[in-house]
Amino acid sequence: MLVSAINTVEIHATQGRSSEVGARVPRMLEVLNSTTPCVAYTLTPGKNDDASWIVSGYWQSESQMQAHFAHPELTGFMELLNSGAISHIQFNSFVVHSSAVT
């Protein structure tokens, strides 16, 4: 299956709240994996501490990725930020353009 688009969310939990974030984010990914057409959503722990993660979503098309940004489950990231559980969050998206080899 060809991946044409990737989105990432880098999150860092506020000191003392990593357990809360670490419990909620995997539940969010279960919902996203089962209710969106993404190839896969994955969660990678940070290398240097247990309070940071990178969430990655892999898509067959940019349009599928763009459409999923309106998914209600994604508000969970903002809820964690607004509650103070997350001290830093960064959203990124990338489109992979392939060219035919002749």
Image: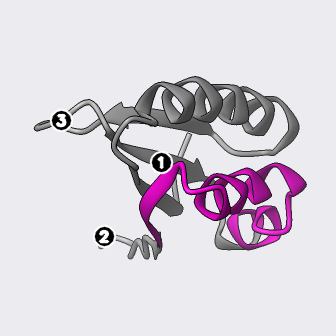
Callout 3: SS: loop
Estimate the spatial distance between the alpha carbons at disc 3 and disc 2, rounded to whole Å. Answer: 42 Å
* Magenta-span inclusion, residue 79: yes
Q: Position of residue 4 (x, y in %)?
A: 53, 62
Q: Is residue 97 left or right of residue 102?
A: right
Name the kind of residue labelled 3 in the image.
Asp
Q: Nearer the viewer, residue 9 or 3?
A: 9
Residue 56 badge: 1
Q: Of circles 3 and 1, which is in front? A: 3
* Magenta-span inclusion, residue 75: yes
Question: Which residue is situated farthest in the left direction here?
Answer: 48
Q: Is residue 27 left or right of residue 94?
A: right
Residue 101 badge: 2
Q: Nearer the viewer, residue 63 or 8?
A: 8
Q: Is residue 31 above or below residue 23?
A: below
| Residue plotted at (40% across, 49% down) | 14
Residue 49 badge: 3
Callout 3–callout 1 Cβ contact below 8 Å: no
Colour style of the rendered protein structure: one colour
Image quarter hosting the C terminus = bottom left
Which picture quadrant has residue 63? bottom right
Residue 43 badge: none
Name the kind of residue labelled 1 in the image.
Ser
Callout 2–callout 1 Cβ contact below 8 Å: no
Q: Is residue 63 above or below residue 35?
A: below
| Residue plotted at (73% across, 51% down) | 76
| Residue plotted at (70% across, 26% down) | 27
Classify mark 2: residues with Cα within 10 Å, few (<14), some (14-19) or many (20+).
few
